[in-house]
């Protein structure tokens, strides 16, 4: 979770420019089911190993000052990843297929310095947009310099190609060598029509990362997203803070040559000036882009020129993984995932410069280790293999999980599910289990059954319009078709109700989030985290005893990828 600690909780959900995000301290809507009346009688109890004490033991270790904030490419990475590997070994888990507990993840750090202005010319006009004030720009190309020169400008609506929704913003348009200007979010967000895409709930097509991917697939030289605070759900300051810092990217064989040379954002005011110079009206273009049958259009003969100077640093980070082999179907796998990285040693606040990341995501790591310990201590061993995966560089854009998904040590068509844990709340037991991306897959049915055993109810994502489903490591697996679950309690405290937990979360967001103050607190009540970890254990235990594979629901944008993958099963 990155660089958003100065913002109010109501905005934090939308901020995931590079990573997972906190959820807002809002009042939960009505639950999907009331668990108190539907609990499964006689359900098997979770392994005793998962307790507040076990969570505390691991949480204190991974978030201690000795781990130096767990930043990739630092001594903190060496210490934290070795600790995880040592714990996996101590628990008697097997290493990965390469004979070690580490999966190398080659990354490149790109520190880009854009030209001070973007120059727009044409129709006898000349506009100059100022860096940081009007635009930000970066690149994924591993080159000392990238540039676009006199690149024709094109407006392509939302920049979406979604056959399942009958939508193609690039229809009939050749954008090779051109710079595409697109809107933030997706068409359903602005519409009153709940049947357009998923209505106000953001789809993957609304993510800024998708827009860069799609423009590159069409051969564009550049792509600029128009920033508008309401549909983006975060202010320009968030875009700016994320854009000006060095970025880690996955190393690729072609050194990013298949990416657009220039990626970036325009402020809404700058975009309006650009459209006006092209003889177009922003409001009219916006209305057209939200209408079926929208046709992309050249922006009146205008061209764009700009460049970025880059400093490159190539290094290898590492994911940490371990395996508990299945007893009868060891070639089928259930993943438990959490990210080990945080922000290392940085700017001192109140005399403290170590960004310990206790909640984000020390809680996920502690749960991962506690669940591993529970599986090892359970009398009945799993029939399917269990993979415990701690990934790198989540805070930089889900890079470690994405690398695993693209270079899987275990076949994806044999991977049953990913159960992801990211930022669990240390404020006692909860009545709810909030599922991010509710309605996506049958894993919700497993989660509901496990929640009912704990007298809890299932609650859908409370702000689906902000696209939380696409902002933590489970998404990397969903993207390649593996059904994924990302859920935790956090909207209704069993002891303090909704208001108490809302206040506690707001305090975390304001005073601890992405600050050195996010460190272990002995006064925390970790029983709620243990409760979530127990629930995840039960879901994995049930999946491991079955012969079927959970499916994506109809309408999920990941269903096709799974079906394609499973075709070779």
Image: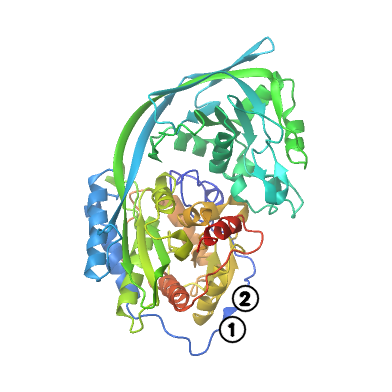
- Is 438 located above or below residue 274 in the figure? below
Q: Which residue is mark 1?
A: 38
Residue 277 falls left or right of residue 427: right
**Between 278 and 57, the one nearer to me in the picture:** 278
Q: Position of residue 77 (x, y in %)?
A: 27, 49
Find the residue positioned furthest to the top.
Answer: 124
User: Where in the figure is residue 135, as x and y percent of width and height?
Assistant: 54, 27
| Closer to the camera in the image, 317 or 172 | 172
Find residue 198 and report its horizontal and vertical position in percent.
Answer: 68, 54
Q: Does residue 465 appear in the picture of this structure?
A: yes
The answer to whether residue 523 is seen in the rendering is no
Distance (Cα) linking label 2 and label 1: 8 Å
Q: Quadrant of residue 254?
A: top left
Callout 2: few (<14), some (14-19), or many (20+) C-alpha neighbours within 10 Å? some
Asked whether disc 2 touches disc 1, contact meaning CB atoms under 8 Å apart, the reply is yes
The residue shown at (44%, 47%) is: 5
Q: Residue at (57%, 51%) from the top-left corner?
A: 467
Q: Which mark is residue 506?
A: none
Sequence-wise, the earlier of marks 2 and 1 is 2
On the rendered structure, is 177 left or right of 49? right
The one of 332 and 459 positioned closer to us in this rendering: 332
Q: Residue pushed farthest bottom?
A: 42
Q: Residue 109's x, y, as percent? A: 35, 36
**For the image shown, how many numbered marks are present on the structure?**
2
Q: Where does label 2 land, which residue?
A: 33
| Residue at disc 2, secondary structure | loop
* SS at badge 1: loop
Identify which residue is drawn at 45% across, 79% down.
545
Left or right for 242, reference 216: left
């Amino acid at each position: 979770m990155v660089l958003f600690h100065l913002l109010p909780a109501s905005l934090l959900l939308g901020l995931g420019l590079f990573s997972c995000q906190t959820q807002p301290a809002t009042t939960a809507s009505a639950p999907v089911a009331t668990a108190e009346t539907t609990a499964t009688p006689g359900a098997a109890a979770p392994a005793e190993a998962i307790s507040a004490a076990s969570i505390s033991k691991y949480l204190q270790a991974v978030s201690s000052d000795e781990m130096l904030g767990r930043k990739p490419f630092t001594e903190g990475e060496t210490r934290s990843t070795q600790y995880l590997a040592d714990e996996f070994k101590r628990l008697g888990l097997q290493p990965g297929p390469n004979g070690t507990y580490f999966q190398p993840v080659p990354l490149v750090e790109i520190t880009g310095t854009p030209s001070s202005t973007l120059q727009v010319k044409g129709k006898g006009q000349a506009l100059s947009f100022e860096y940081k004030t009007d635009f930000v720009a970066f690149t994924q190309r591993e080159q000392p310099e990238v540039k676009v020169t006199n690149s024709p400008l094109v407006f392509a609506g939302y920049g979406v190609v979604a056959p399942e929704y009958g939508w193609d913003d690039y229809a009939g348009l050749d954008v090779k060598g051109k710079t595409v200007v697109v809107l933030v979010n997706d068409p359903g967000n602005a519409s009153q029509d709940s049947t357009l895409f998923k209505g106000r709930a953001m789809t993957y097509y609304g993510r800024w990362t998708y827009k860069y991917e799609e423009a590159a697939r069409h051969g564009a030289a550049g792509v600029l997203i128009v920033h508008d605070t309401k549909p983006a759900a975060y202010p320009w300051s968030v875009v700016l803070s994320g854009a000006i810092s060095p970025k880690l990217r996955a190393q690729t064989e072609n050194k990013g040559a298949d990416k657009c040379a220039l990626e970036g954002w325009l402020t809404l005011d700058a975009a309006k000036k650009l459209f006006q110079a092209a003889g177009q009206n922003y409001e009219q273009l916006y209305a057209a882009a939200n209408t079926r049958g929208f046709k992309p259009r050249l922006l009146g003969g205008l061209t764009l020129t700009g460049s970025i100077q880059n400093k490159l640093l190539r290094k290898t980070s590492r994911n940490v993984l371990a395996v508990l082999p299945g007893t009868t179907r060891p070639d089928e796998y259930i993943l438990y995932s959490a990210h080990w990285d945080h922000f290392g040693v940085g700017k001192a606040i109140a005399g403290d410069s170590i960004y310990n990341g206790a909640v984000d995501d020390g809680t996920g790591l502690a749960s991962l280790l506690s669940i591993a310990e529970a599986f090892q201590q359970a009398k009945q061993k799993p029939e399917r293999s269990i993979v415990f995966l701690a990934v790198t560089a989540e805070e930089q854009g889900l890079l470690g999980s994405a690398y695993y998904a693209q270079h899987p040590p275990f076949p994806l068509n044999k991977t049953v599910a990913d159960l992801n844990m990211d930022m669990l709340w240390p404020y006692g037991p909860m009545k709810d289990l909030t599922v991010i991306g509710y309605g996506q897959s049958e894993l919700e049915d497993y989660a509901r059954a496990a929640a009912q055993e704990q007298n809890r109810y299932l609650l859908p994502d409370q702000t689906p319009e902000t696209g939380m489903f696409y902002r933590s490591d489970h998404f990397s697996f969903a993207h390649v078709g593996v059904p994924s679950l990302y859920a935790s309690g956090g909207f209704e405290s069993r002891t303090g109700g909704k208001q108490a937990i809302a206040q506690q979360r707001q305090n975390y967001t304001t005073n601890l989030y992405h600050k050195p103050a996010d460190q272990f607190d002995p006064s925390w009540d970790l029983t709620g985290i243990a409760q979530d970890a127990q629930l995840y254990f039960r879901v994995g235990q049930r999946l491991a005893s079955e012969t079927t594979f959970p499916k994506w629901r109809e309408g999920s944008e990941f269903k096709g990828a799974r079906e394609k993958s499973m075709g070779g099963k």
